[in-house]
Structure formats: C-alpha cells, structure tokens
Image: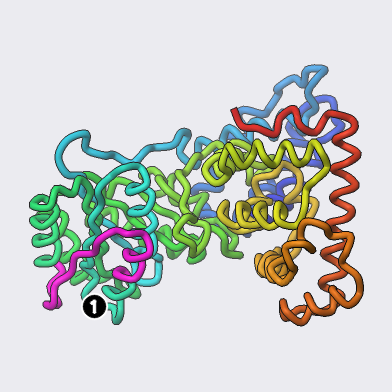
Amino acid sequence: MFEELSLKLDKALKKVTGQGKLTENNISDTLREIRRILLDADVNYKVAKEFIDNVSAKALGREVIASVTPGQLITKIIYDELTELLGSKNEELKLNPSGITIILIVGLQGSGKTTFSAKLAKRLSERKRKVLLAAADVYRPAAIEQLKTLGSHINVPVFSIEEKDAIKTAELALQYAKENHHDTLIIDTAGRLHVDEEMMNEVSKIKELTKPTETLFVVDAMTGQDAVNSAKAFNEKVNYDGIILTKLDGDARGGAALSIRSVVGKPIKFVSNGEKLNDIDIFYPDRLASRILGKGDIVSLVEKAQQTIDEAEAEKLEEKLRKNKFDFDDFLKQIKAIKKMGSLSSIIGMIPGLNSQIKTANIDDRALIKVEAIINSMTREERSAPKILNGSRRKRIARGSGTSIQDVNRLIKQFNEMQKMIGQLSKKGSMFKNLRFN
C-alpha cells in the first residue's frame, strides 16, 4: 500500500541531501513537496498541515553535525513525527486475567470483520485461550456459514441461533461461553454499506448487554477518507477501544492509515495484510513509519521467521549449507516457510532498501505455486541430485507440472546459480554466523 508514497518521499528528501545546513528555504521547498505528496496519498488535510508544521518547527535552524547529512536529519525528524502521528507506541489487546474476555467486532459491511474475527480467534487460541466465536451478523447472506467455515479451519467453535436476532445471539453466546468455560468470546456483528441509525442502535445494545472488554472497529484501509469518516461516526455512537486496519496489502494510497489515529484519537491495534488466517499483525507505529520511509522493518521480519521456522529444521539446513548439499527438497521446505510468513510483497516491504529497488513491480505470489508444482513433479532422485536432469526428464517435469520447458529450465538455472553462490560463501565462512535466531 505504501510503496508509491515511500518512493515519492524518498525523492523529495533527496533535495536536501548534500547541503551543509537545514535552512528556511531548503526546508520550505522540501516540506511543500511532502505536503503535496501526503494530500495526493489522501491524508486528511488538517492532519497533513499539522504534520508539516511540526516537522518545520523541529527542523528549522538545526545544525547538521559532521556525521549526519541534512537529508538524514530531516528524515529522522519526519520518522519521529510519523511515529507520533500513527500513535507513538503499540497498544496491546486487553485480556481479562480472570473471568471471560469479551471482544466486540464492529464496522461497515465489506470491511473484513468476519475474516478478522477468525484471524483474531486463531491468534488467541494459539496463545492457549479457549475461544468462542459468536455469529451475530444475522443479515448478510451466508455470513454465519462463512464464520462457521473459518471456525472449522482453526478448530474454534461458532455459536449461532436460527432466529435473525443479533442481540439475542450475543446474549445467548455469552451465557454459553460462561457455561462451557470459554475464557474468550469474540462477537462478529452485522455491518451496512453505510452508517445508519438502525445498525448503530443494535451495536450499542449489544455493547450495553455484553459489556465487552474491548470493542474493535474494523476498517478497510483502501476506502480512503471514507474510512476516516465512518471511524468518526462509529466512535461517536459506540465509543470503541481500538482500530483494526484491513487490506493493507492493497494498492490504495494509504492516506486513511496515516490519518485515522490522529482524527479519531483511538489506537490502531492490529493490521491485516491478506486473506490467509495468519495474515494479522500487532500494529507498531515506529515499524510502519520505518517502512513508509523505505527503511524496512527487520524486527517484524525476524519475528515472522521465528514463528514459522522450526529451530531443529534450521540447524539441519545450516549443516546442509555448510556442506553445500542444499537440494530441491530443502528449497521446497524454504518456499513453504516463506508462504507461511505472508505475501511476497509484504515480506519485501520489510527488507530495507529492497522495496525502493523493485519500485512498483508486480510481485506475484503465484510464481511460488509454479515453482512448487515443478519441484513436486520431480522424482525423489531428481530432487536430491539435480545434475541428472537431462532434456527428457525436464520435458516430463514440464508436462507433469503444467508448465513450459522454459519454466523448468529457468528454475534449474536459478537453482544452480544459487548453489554456486552458497558454495562460495561457505568457503569464505561468512555465511553462517547469523543464520540461527537467538
């Protein structure tokens, strides 16, 4: 979502690079350009103005020490202001240490409430919470079935009733949760295409009845300033505790994500970057600020890797790499681990500098599916000894994987080049110092 914004900001900041001091003129020129970039990104105009005023006040007249360029200094000031704009620090989900935790999910139709409810249920159940999902979206066709399907995927029960009564559903779900010793109840409520009084009254009654520990407003980050407007309307009526930004993997301009915290005054607690049930992350303002400025987010990348890479498997892989015995089976395992970490575009966005190098290239996750198909069409012998892959074997693999002979040749060539690089690095002894996570 922030690729274009990052590239434009990087270009604007280069205008002060190489100058000895931040002056009124070079600050004014740079910030005028940044203000235009923010408005183009659909950032709320009041938020953009206040942001630029704050940066200007902090940058004006600041001397540049020998080890820091003007570009680096103003980037640091902008990073600090972006972090402050996004909420300064992360705000964790409140969970009752004893008794039941009730989480009420609200928002407009199409914002991703139901999918987020399942993602949150999965996350909490993996942390040893006994979760119950309540299907209180009784109006949208197939909403209850959708939640039940998602619940079955994550082994979390879903409570529903035959009647189209959301308030009764919430009330009975709470009673059921208490009777069956669930420590967490997540209530998925109905949405509308726009804010209306009927929906607001229903949500307010459910909140009054269940007295939730947390009320979370789910908003589609791709809807721009409409997202900010609906967030304000919901907060005035429901007074929720936190914001969930969904569809951050989309190609919208990102202005809602930058504006919403400042306009509504409520913290962003989670972000969702895709449709997979693992695609949910705690929101860290400083990490997103770093990504927006093209500096990546190595901390989040390492955390994702730690969650998906088995330590024993990592040790085996390290040993194989040392001995230059990395084969297609190992390659397939690494592809599966990468897929668990999220979309390729989200991973690339966490690597410092790489996002700006690839610019707006279309990163297609389906490329990994094609690679998997090719490797799965190889025999066990071919995977462990790629040198035997002659022309007839390659044709058979192409037919079996539904790909072209050119696709197979390309993959084998890339694999051979990777093996050579691994061999060279292995001889130098520099590759393996930091492979394991401490």
Task: Tell me where residue 74 appears, x and y as whole percent.
Answer: 70, 32
Horizontal side, residue 340 vs residue 90: left or right? right
Residue 224 seen in the figure? no
User: Which of 334 and 104 lies nearest the eye of the viewer?
Assistant: 334
Residue drawn at point x = 81 percent, y = 41 percent? 15
Task: Tell me where residue 334 appears, x and y as whole percent.
Answer: 67, 52
Residue drawn at point x = 56 percent, y = 42 percent? 310
User: Which of 435 and 103 lies nearest the eye of the viewer?
Assistant: 435
Element type at marker 1?
loop
Residue 376 sits above or below residue 416 on the image: below
Horizontal side, residue 316 vs residue 261: left or right? right
* Mark 1 crowd level (few <14, some 14–19, many ≥20, 10 Å Cα): some
Q: Tell me the residue that label 1 is attached to.
A: 139
Residue drawn at point x = 69 percent, y = 50 percent? 6
Q: Which residues are magenta?
A: 147-166
Residue drawn at point x = 29 percent, y = 53 percent? 235
Q: Does 257 appear in magenta? A: no
User: Which of 192 and 362 lies nearest the eye of the viewer?
Assistant: 362
* Total tally of numbered discs in the picture: 1
Residue 234 seen in the figure? yes
> Type of residue at label 1?
Tyr
Q: Does 160 appear in magenta? A: yes
View extreme (front): residue: 381
Task: Tell me where residue 8 appears, x and y as whole percent.
Answer: 73, 52
Q: Quadrant of the N terminus?
A: bottom right
Task: Tell me where residue 417 appears, x and y as whole percent.
Answer: 89, 53
